[in-house]
Image (cartoon, grey):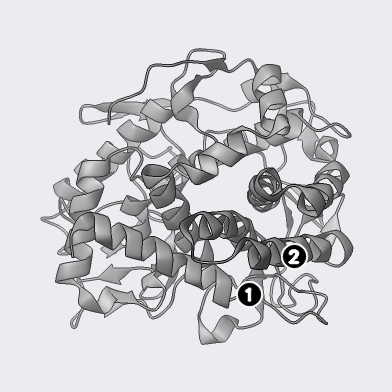
Amino acid sequence: MDARAILEEEARRSFRFFYEEANTDLASPGYGLIRDKTSAKAEDIASIASVGFGLSAFVIGVERGWISHEVAFNRVKKTLHSFYHNVEHVNGFFYHFVNMTTGKRHRDFHDCASIIDTSIFLNGALTAASYFGGDVENYFQKIYQRVDWSKYYNQEENVYYMGYHKETGGFGRWDMYAEQMMQYFLGVASPTYPVPADIYQGFERRLMTYKTYTFYNSPGGALFTHQFSHAWFNFKSYLDPDGIDWFKNATVASKASRAFSIDQQTNFKTYHKNAWGLTACEGPNGYIVPGTPPYYDEVKMTLDGTVPPCGAIGSIVFTPDVVKEAVYYYYHQHPDLFGKYGFFDAYNEELSPTWYADMVIGIDKGISLLMIDNYLHGTTWKYYMQHPIINRAVTKLGFQKREVRVKS
């Protein structure tokens, strides 16, 4: 199987995760919720972000012929009905993890009403609304207009709070570059509770250099921070109001990630030119968030040799040639890494025998599916970018359209 065929199969099997690992009980308050991961220990845990990727997945599924328009429309409409009427929220913001059946905050997590996870959900809902229209658009608007962005706006520091705990109140600050770019588009365009466009200037842009690669990095350099917002917003077509090219930045970050793995191959058996893309994933001892330097001073990074295929795959739109080499390597050299839902979450050759994750994680399947499909077909980019909310956000933030395409 060549690299393109592997990518297409990975996309198809990733879609299968979102289709099969959802609550489809019409009598359940949690209809449409999608599992956080396939671990047997997490059967009743749904991830709001996983649902966001899943809603976009249904659009892709119709376009690729994996599911009928009617089935997808009904699934999406009923999912949004659940979110509007049943899924627990605070000021319109949903909890990161909720119970698959009830839609209430999961008992095992002292968890927050999360602005980033809600934004990922809204991105998926907006994409579906743009594609399906009708009742899907109506439910999306009700959910979106209920979100009180102003409650999560720290006026003194001109940044978003990260979340809200029932027990302790608001916490954290989005004061650095990371995956939160989507929040600025959604927040400034709100017709009910908007934040000022100047919030976009509130986070620090820290220009950093690894070897010959200079780019704005996130604190720990996990590659998902350079990918998640790009899965929906087509930064390839825009410069920000200060002339920053975020698509080029993500491209350079992806190249730096690969270079770092090449440099580390003397320290770790797993890392090399075809095994790269350090990002949040499952590791041999639990969830880990490895990344690429330079790191912020406050970050103490520990690496263990774990490689998640979604790290490289999520950069297919930025560095397609080397990503194709990586997926070809993963598929042919590590057959135990590929299963029912495509690539398992990660592997690690530092252990003997080689450790392979026995699960997939929804957001990792999601970034793989959306980015593969954007690279091959541009589906999510097309429908997300044509929605009036995104057009309004682009104008309010002062992003400038351009016609010149960036070469990877």
What is the secondary structure assignment of the residue under circle 2? helix
At x 86% / y 48%, what residue is drawn? 142
At x 27% / y 62%, what residue is drawn? 6
The amino acid type, in three-letter code, at marker 2 is Thr
Of the image marks 1 and 2, the number of the one nearer the N terminus: 1
Give the answer, above or below, for where 62 lies relative to 315.
below
Quadrant of the snapshot with the N terminus: bottom left
Residue 144 seen in the current view: yes
Give the answer, above or below, for where 90 lies relative to 79.
above
Mark 1 is surrounded, within 10 Å at the Cα level, by few (under 14), some (14 to 19) or many (20 or more) other residues, namely: many
The amino acid type, in three-letter code, at marker 1 is Ala
The label shown at residue 210 is: none
Quadrant of the snapshot with the C terminus: top left
- Where residue 124 appears, x then y in whole percent? 63, 51
Q: Quadrant of residue 342?
A: bottom left
At x 78% / y 25%, what residue is drawn? 156
At x 28% / y 43%, what residue is drawn? 257
What is the secondary structure assignment of the residue under circle 1? loop
- Where residue 82 appears, x then y in whole percent? 81, 66
Q: Are marks 1 and 2 in contact (CB under 8 Å)?
A: yes
Mark 2 is surrounded, within 10 Å at the Cα level, by few (under 14), some (14 to 19) or many (20 or more) other residues, namely: many
- Where residue 176 appears, x then y in whole percent? 55, 33
The label shown at residue 22 is: 1
> Could you give the CA–CA distance between mark 1 and mark 2, rounded to whole angstroms?
10 Å
Q: Which residue is mark 2?
A: 79
